[in-house]
Image: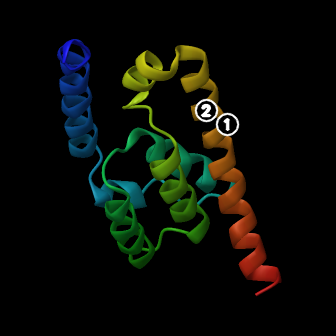
Amino acid sequence: MRTFVNLLPIFTGMLLLTSLVLTLFPERLYAGFFGSSNTLDALIGASVGSMAAGHPLASYLLGGELLDNGVSLVAVTALIVSWVTVGLVQLPVEALLLGARFAFCRNVISFFSAIAVALLSVWSLRYIG
């Protein structure tokens, strides 16, 4: 019980930061960021997804809306993968529970993996499928 009480301020801060991030980045704002090149779209998508927080199901719904608004598949794929695997908002709690070095390394690896997965997925759909 003592551990929970000690973590409560951090969880509260994480929830407040999550609400702030979701408020600052509405769906229609995302569409204006994309469209340059596949690599840049993947980088931007992974960056936005890293800052976003919420249930993974919400990322799929957001991805569908972004695709309907003309955002490239590589950007949406990077956004969804990084949304689910990278957690900048949750990083303080993860660092406290699992160690700062582990949390940082996991997030960096997940970020670059999201970009690679997005580029390879779109490439495989284009050339193989």
Image location of residue 8, percent across then percent down: 19, 20
Image location of residue 42, percent across then percent down: 62, 54
Q: Residue furthest bottom?
A: 129
Q: As drawn, is 52 to the left or to the right of 37? A: left
Q: Quadrant of residue 2?
A: top left
Image location of residue 119, percent across then percent down: 71, 61
Find disc 2 in the rendering and name its residue: 106
Q: Label 2: state its secondary structure.
A: helix
- Residue type, label 2: Arg
Q: Are marks 2 and 1 in contact (CB under 8 Å)?
A: yes
Query: Is residue 38 at least partly visible in the picture?
Result: no
- Residue type, label 1: Ile
- Residue 109 is marked as 1
- Classify 124 as above or below 80: below
Query: Is residue 12 at least partly visible in the picture?
Result: yes
Q: Residue furthest right?
A: 127
Q: As drawn, is 19 to the left or to the right of 123? A: left
Q: Between marks 2 and 1, how big is the CA–CA gap?
A: 5 Å
Q: Quadrant of the image for the C terminus? A: bottom right
- Classify 73 as above or below 86: below
Residue drawn at x 25%, y 19% as measured from the top left: 10
Q: Label 1: state its secondary structure.
A: helix
Could you say which is closer to the camera, residue 39 or residue 106? 106
